[in-house]
Amino acid sequence: MTYTETVNWMFAQLPMYQQQGASAYKKDLTNTLLLSQHLGHPEQNLKLIHVAGTNGKGSTSHMLASILQEAGYKTGLYTSPHLKDFRERIKIDGKEISEDFVVGFIARNQSFFEANALSFFEMSVGLAFDYFSKEKVDVAIIEVGLGGRLDSTNIITPLVSVITNIGYDHVQFLGNTLELIAAEKAGIIKPGIPVVIGEYTSETKPVFEQKAQACHSDIYFASDLVREDYPSDMKGNYQFHNKKTVVQTLRVLQAKNQLAVSEEQIKNGLQNVIRHTGLLGRWQQLQDHPKVIADTAHNKAGLEMTLRQIQENEFDQLHIVLGVVNDKDLDEILPLFPKNAVYYFCRPDIPRGLDAQHLASKASGFGLTGQIYHSVPEAYQSALQHAAPSDFIYIGGSTFVVAEIL
């Protein structure tokens, strides 16, 4: 198979969460453990940092990678979902895995995948571990896909576990209270392995503390411990807490003599995250006059911060290109959006994209008005045509809306 045929075959194996949503969520690690055994347990050869959380886990993972690259470590980075190409998920020192490696891995293991009905995400995790092991990385950052306790990545024993924060997202899998969601994320805390918590609330702190105590794990609350705010090329206001989480994580690793990173390397790494890692879609400015910002925030906590940051800008008229997936709680997110913006409603081009007509009609109940478009690019082009140089265009609501613009 060619690379394109290989990736399309992977996408077609058992539902893929990016495309299908709920039906792709597997509450079991059996397959991943089987795959690890089949591959010779590649994850056991690796020094790993495990990152979970409702928001910020992707940014935090990329910041950690950037700093460790700056410090001279050969650094693996596994994240999800991808925006344009599957290979974005698996990088070493900011360089995507080669097409040949992906093709070869699937070809060698295809009969095993089929015999054991492995999902797309399970294969991807196995591929990342196999690649990082064969390439002999010094360290790899592994971002949880969804939740924590039952996520395919949770077969690892890392140097440190990181939980960025807890908010309401994927409640149909993780539970509908902050305590239940925190318990799922806290599932990545391992016996005797330190854990860094980015942000906490009165509901989530006891959950983390109890799990850490049960595991005899040292626990560090970054928001209480890190006083400095470091400048970064990641301009979203929401990066304030992620940066603290990253710095505390590195301090823990240094204190245990597991990795050595200087203050200078932390500063340089945070200033060059995009250059070092190729991260896309986080408060990403696409042009000026009118200013265009694309951001992948897609749940209440993320959108609240992003929409607040928009209001800190000076502009005459706000234009919002908006699309969402069909499992979003619209009653929770639509009230966050400003009524005085002009809306361009669209449907992200994936099977679980929500119909733009349905989104527009639901939005009108919250005083949000605008036109409906057949595609994300068409909605964006219309916004560019209608916006004056002194206006502001925001593209968001879903990772997959942003992916179509970049």
Image (cartoon, grey):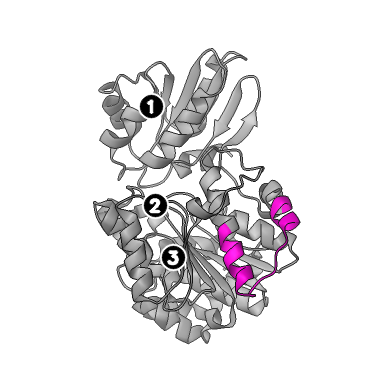
Which amino acid does the dot numbered 1 rest on?
Phe
In-image side of 315 versus 74 (left or right): left
Name the residue at 70% across, 46% down: 271
Please state which of residues 114 and 354 is positioned toward the viewer in this rendering: 354
Residue 350, percent from left and from top:
41, 46
Find the magenta span and give its range. 248-268
- What is the spatial separation of the Cα atoms under label 2 and label 1, in whole angstroms? 25 Å
Give the image location of residue 77, x and y in percent.
60, 63
Circle number at residue 121: 3
For residue 217, side relative to residue 61 (left or right): left
Q: Is residue 32 above or below residue 395?
A: below
Crowd band around label 3 with a 10 angstrom C-alpha radius: few (<14), some (14–19), many (20+):
many
Q: Is residue 100 above or below residue 56?
A: below
Residue 390 lies in quadrant: top right
Q: Measure the alpha-carbon separation of dots 2 and 3.
A: 29 Å
Q: Which residue is mark 1?
A: 337
Q: Which residue is mark 2?
A: 200
The three-letter code of the residue at mark 3 reads Phe
